[in-house]
Amino acid sequence: MEGRVAFVTGASRGIGRAIALQLAAAGASVAVCAREDHAASVASEIIETGGIAEALSVDVSDSASLMCAVETATEKFKGIDILVNNAGIVKDQLVMRMKANEWETVINTNLTAAFQSTQGVLRSMLKQRWGRIINISSVVGQSGNPGQANYAASKAGLIGFSKALAREVASRGITVNVVAPGFIETDMTAELDEKARASLSKQIPLGRIGRSIEVASAVCFLASDEASYITGQVIAVNGGMYM
């Protein structure tokens, strides 16, 4: 991926961090995007290993903040070739008890921000007739999960958005795909006790929780030239939890 530029949201930890590091290891310059100054350590790690990175402070739920980051990255790197919409939040609650702001915040962060960042990078991708857009959904967006109607709706929405967009831009050499992780080792799952982890593992045919690098590897492949004939697809990285 020498000469390619990647813009990765939610890149300060977990899956997003692994994606940023993997793309950088493959030779891409990476705009590492996260809230406040949380992106700095990941960008520094990339630079220390000989890569090229820029840390950008971004609140993806704030369209002005997001557009400013896209413009900054575009100006610094002279364009964006690869967009990875990874940033996401959860605000779990049963539908009967869910407040309007709990719905809106999750939809805005997980789905609307992906639409806005895509608009921000699309013009240059269309002009150069090459681009990779990869949206990070979830197994929950495919199967549903009680207490996560807002999250499931946002992640299922990403799948529909990606399929529609893939048809719009395919003639310009731009591919749009989705990676849908299952249960992955992150800060969130690290807080689970052994009983909860064992219960989760029993739901997974491969019998274990996944690793962030396994999701990042799928993203890195979809961002490469080797995946040039793959578009509008959902790549499930879930150990067989949902088939």
Image (cartoon, rainbow, N blue to C red):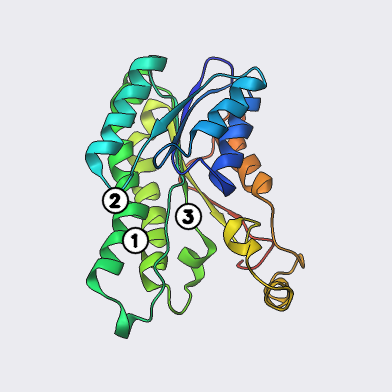
Q: What residue would you read off at disc 2?
A: 112
Q: Secondary structure at mark 3?
A: loop
Q: Secondary structure at mark 2?
A: helix
Taking the spot 63% from the left edge, 33% from the top edge, the residue there is 22
Q: Is residue 221 left or right of residue 147?
A: right
Q: What residue would you read off at disc 1?
A: 106
Q: Position of residue 162 (x, y in %)?
A: 39, 47
Instruction: Name which quarter of the figure residue 183 lies in.
Output: bottom right
**What is the C-alpha distance between the residues marked 2 and 3?**
13 Å
Taking the spot 36% from the left edge, 58% from the top edge, the residue there is 157
**What is the C-alpha distance between the residues marked 3 and 1?**
13 Å
Q: Nearer the viewer, residue 201 or 41?
A: 41
Between discs 3 and 1, the one toward the N terminus: 1
Q: What residue would you read off at disc 3?
A: 137
Between discs 1 and 2, the one toward the N terminus: 1
Between discs 2 and 3, the one toward the N terminus: 2
**Marks 3, 1: nearer the viewer:** 1
Q: Position of residue 135 (x, y in %)?
A: 45, 46
**Marks 1, 2: nearer the viewer:** 1
Which residue reaches farthest bottom? 96
Which residue reaches farthest right? 207
Amino acid type, mark 2: Thr
Instruction: Name which quarter of the figure residue 193 lies in.
Output: bottom right
Amino acid type, mark 3: Ser
